[in-house]
Amino acid sequence: MDTDGRVRSYNARRGRLSALTLERIATLGPRYAVPAAGPLAPELVFGRTAPMVLEVGCGHGAAALAYAAAHPDHDLLAVDVFVPALARMLAAAERQGLTNLRAHQGDAVLLLEQRVLSGSLDAVHVFFPDPWPKAKHAKRRFIAPHTLDLVAHRLVPGGHLLLATDSDGYAAHVRSVVAGHGGFVVTEGERPPWRPLDGFEAKGLAAGRSVCEFRVVPVQSG
């Protein structure tokens, strides 16, 4: 728990930023950043009205970049707390000429709580989140009743949450929390064809771990 009393789903790493990272943020940040304040209406963030996807914990952005490239008619907002990772993603986005990707450095839960509008997201992606394997840290896991409520409220009708993990413990946690929530229909085993085999997924497979894929869709009331 941080000094403000909030439970975080990430480690607040600190350290000096490299000259390359600082240069990338200075030159590319303004082009790819979301507005500093106010509701994140798609037309304000991307300059158009199109299906919008939120990726939580994008890291270096392999999945975010691949999705944006494969879905030019969609817009993707990638969120992470780590500046060097975002800077690397922005450099790749520039090289690829992607115009449908934006980045936000900060807490995705706060963004969902305070700035993402109701019914404004077509999908939420959470790929290989920190599994927080120790029992005393389980409260830090991103999938929790509160975040599921937020996701359900921010998705358009028919929208979905995609989640992948190579941690059996985290997969069991997801099954338990989603079943306990009762407001979602879950499908397992469908890997998105556009997602590259990269980063944590590649490391997990190399270590002999299996990947669990979840598609979580809110039950529509009425």
Image (cartoon, rainbow, N blue to C red):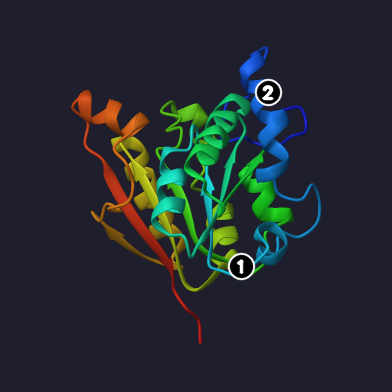
Q: What is the residue that sits farthest to the right in this orientation? A: 37
The answer to whether any part of residue 58 appears in the image is no
Q: Quadrant of residue 169?
A: top left
Q: Which mark is residue 23?
A: 2
Q: Quadrant of the N terminus?
A: top right
Which residue is depicted at the point 46% across and 30% down?
A: 132
Q: Is residue 20 above or below residue 39?
A: above
Spot occupied by residue 91 in the image (x, y as percentages of width and height): 55, 33
The answer to whether any part of residue 67 appears in the image is yes
Helix, strand or loop status at disc 2: helix
The residue carrying pointer 1 sits among few (fewer than 14), some (14 to 19) or many (20 or more) residues within 10 Å by Cα, namely many
Helix, strand or loop status at disc 1: loop
Residue type at mark 1 is Ser
Which residue is depicted at the point 52% across and 43% down?
A: 142
The residue carrying pointer 2 sits among few (fewer than 14), some (14 to 19) or many (20 or more) residues within 10 Å by Cα, namely few
Residue type at mark 2 is Glu
Viewer-side residue, 53 vs 87: 87
Spot occupied by residue 222 in the image (x, y as percentages of width and height): 51, 87
How many marks can you see?
A: 2
